[in-house]
Amino acid sequence: MWVQRVIELTGWEPLGISVDWAAIEGELGVPLPADYKELYEAFGGGVFSDSLYFLGRDESLAFDFLTQWRVSLSVDHDSELGGVSAVEPYAIYAPGGKGLVPWGSTEWADEYFWLIDAERPGEYPVLARADDVGAWHRYDMSTSEFLYRVLADADFQPFGVARYALSPTFEPSSGNDE
């Protein structure tokens, strides 16, 4: 329902990307949210409303979900950085553990993650923070509902981009030429 609302809001024609979910979820060690998979297959990676960066499939890697997760995990576990996580008080999810997996951000340094616990597959609360160092906000809603509210609900504070009167559009990354 929410994926369809995002599609209708943006006027997007779904790409129908074929995805090897077994390989992606095998690397992560957990299943991903079903609605995120629908968004990924419909949109790939790219930019909503000229400001919200959505991680999906992207051959150029800038918007590639797995690439960005691997980079975040590598940086989060780099011992030369002194053991401080960029997502304190959390950590980036490592297979079999509990932590954050990035799926989106904005040009204003807002960041969107799922809190994933390998021992509780199927639970995907959205954790978001504004300005890269702001307080964490937890949303017990689907990825697509959160995305829709950010794009369409001007009162969805502090993350709603609709308050800036941005057109609800989607621009695919250069690597999504289907």
Image (cartoon, rainbow, N blue to C red):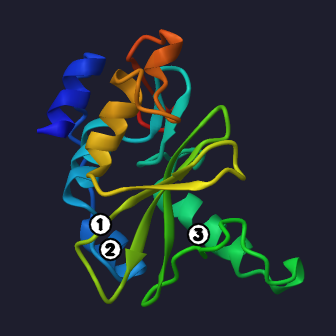
Question: Where on the picture, by quarter, is residue 162?
Answer: top left
- Please state, as top left, top right, bottom left or bottom right, where the N terminus lies in the image: top left
Q: Secondary structure at mark 3?
A: helix
Left or right, residue 107 beside residue 169: right
Earlier sequence position, callout 3 versus callout 2: 2
What residue sits right under mark 2 in the picture?
Answer: 25
**Residue at 36 percent of width and 38 percent of height:** 147
Q: Residues within 10 Å of mark 1 (few under 14, many from 20)?
A: some
Residue 103 showing in the rendered view: yes
**Residue at 64 percent of width and 73 percent of height:** 89
Q: Nearer the viewer, residue 98 or 72?
A: 98
Residue 118: x %, y % from top left:
35, 85
Q: Nearer the viewer, residue 25 or 119?
A: 119
Q: Are marks 1 and 2 in contact (CB under 8 Å)?
A: yes
Q: Are marks 3 and 2 in contact (CB under 8 Å)?
A: no
Q: Nearer the viewer, residue 140 or 168?
A: 140
Q: Secondary structure at mark 1?
A: loop
Earlier sequence position, callout 1 versus callout 2: 2
Q: Name the kind of residue labelled 3 in the image.
A: Arg
Give the spatial CA distance, label 3 vs label 2.
13 Å
What residue sits right under mark 1 in the picture?
Answer: 32
Q: Compared with residue 119, is residue 47 higher up or lower down, i.e. above or below?
A: above
What residue sits right under mark 3 in the picture?
Answer: 70
Residue 88: x %, y % from top left:
67, 70
Q: Residues within 10 Å of mark 3 (few under 14, many from 20)?
A: some
Q: Secondary structure at mark 2?
A: helix
Left or right, residue 147 beside residue 52: left
Residue 178 showing in the rendered view: no
Q: Residues within 10 Å of mark 2 (few under 14, many from 20)?
A: some
Count of numbered marks: 3
Residue 70: x %, y % from top left:
58, 69
**Residue at 21 percent of width and 51 percent of height:** 35
